[in-house]
Amino acid sequence: MILDSIVSKRILVRFDFNVPMNKGNIVNDFRIKQSLETIQKLLENKNKIIIFSHLGRPTEGVYEESLSLKPICKYLSALLDRDIKFFNSYTDDINFKDYEIAMLENVRFNKGEKSSNSDLSKAYASLADYFVFDAFGVSHRKESSTFGVSEYLKTYPGLNISNEISTINKLINEDSRPMTIIISGAKVSTKLIVIKKLLAKCDFMILGGGILNTFLKAKGSEIGKSLYEEDLVNEAKNILSSDFSSKIIFPTDLSCESESKPKNKDVCNISKNDIIFDIGEKSLTEIKSIINKSSAIFWNGPLGYVEKEPFDRGTIELAKTIAEHNCFSIIGGGDTLPIIENLNLQSQYSCLSTGGGSLLTYLEGGDLPILDKLDL
C-alpha cells in the first residue's frame, strides 16, 4: 500500500467535500465518509494532516458563509472522534501543537484557484511535505488544489481514489458478459460520448430521463411536453442508425403525468399534453429481467423524476434489483447515491463512485490531468 511509506510527515490532502447542504446542515455525507480510510491510515503512521476541499460555486475571492467548510469540519470531527483545527486561510500558522488534523477554508474562496495560479499552488505546497489526492470527483479539473499543487509536491493517491480507479478499470476491461449499461439524466449532451463508447462495449443499454425522451423523439415517438434536447435529436438518430442500435432497450410503456394525474401509458398512447416522468410497469419488469441475467452493470443517473412520487418507483426498483443480484456493479452520479443510501443498500454494490463528471470523462477516455501524477 503506497501510503504505508509515508511516516511522520506533514500531509496536504485534497478531498471532495462538495456535499449537499441545507441551512448549514449536511444532507448527504457519503463523500465525507469515503475520506475516513485515508485519514485513519495517515494518522496510524503518525502523520499530521492538512485537509482542503471546495464546496459549491462561490464567486472566487469572495467569502460566502453558506459555503464555509466549518460545518463539515465539525461533522468530520465527530465522525473521527477527535478535534480538527479549522483555519480561515492557508496563510495562517498551522503548527500542530495540540492537534493532528487541520482543515482549511473552502479553496474556491481563494483568488487563482480555478485558473490553477502558480503562486497559489506554490503556497499550498509550502504547507506540507507530501500531497495526497483523494478527490476523484474533481480529478477532471485543472485547479490549484487539484493539479496545481502536484507540480510542486510529491503526490500520492488516497485509498478511495485508488479503489475507485481500480474498480472502474475492471469494468472497462471486464470480460464477464452480459454487460448492461444504464445511462439517465436530463441532458444527452453531457453523456453523448460515453453513450457511444459504452454502446460499442455493452450487451444492453437502458436509457432514462431526458436522454430517453430525446431518443424517443428521434425514433418518431410522441413525447408530449416531456423534457428533451431538440438540437441533439439528429445525433440520436445517427446513433440509432449505427450497428449497435439494437443494444438500446426502449420501453414499451411509460409513467406519465397525464391530465395532472400519474398514469401508466403504452408508448404508442402518449398524448401531446403528457409529461413522461418514469419507466412504465411492463418496461420495469423487462429491465429487471435484463439485470438478473447480467454479469456486469454500470449505472449513472436516476431513471425518473425521483423527487416526486410515484415517479421514483423505477429508480428504487432498479436499485433493489441490482443490489439483490450477484454481479459486478458500479454506481456513479451524485443524484443516484442518496437514493441508494436511503434504501441502505450501499454495501451491496461493487463500487459507489464519488465521481460524476470525472467518472464519465474517465470512461470516455478523456483527460484527467492529476491521474498522470498518481500513476493509477
Image: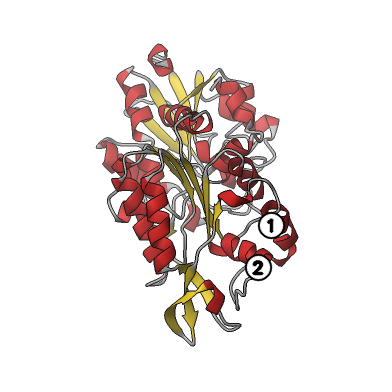
Q: Check the picture and name the quadrant holding the N terminus.
A: top left
Q: How many marks?
A: 2
Question: Is the residue under label 2 in contact with that under label 1 (CB below 8 Å)?
Answer: yes
Image quarter of residue 221: bottom right
Question: Residue drawn at (54%, 41%), measured in percent from left and top?
Answer: 202
Question: For this view, does 115 lie left or right of residue 86?
Answer: right
Which residue does the numbered mark 1 point to in the structure image? 236
Q: Position of residue 12 (x, y in %)?
A: 48, 27
Q: Is residue 80 above or below residue 310?
A: above
**Residue pictured at 47% horizontal, 60% vertical:** 303
Estimate the spatial distance between the alpha carbons at disc 1 and disc 2, rounded to whole Å. Answer: 9 Å
**Residue, disc 2:** 217
Q: Name the amino acid type tagged 2.
A: Lys
Residue 119 vs residue 373: left or right?
Answer: right
Image coords of residue 55 (percent x, y): 51, 49
Percent x, y for residue 15?
47, 36
Residue positioned most to the left? 81
The image quarter containing residue 238 is bottom right
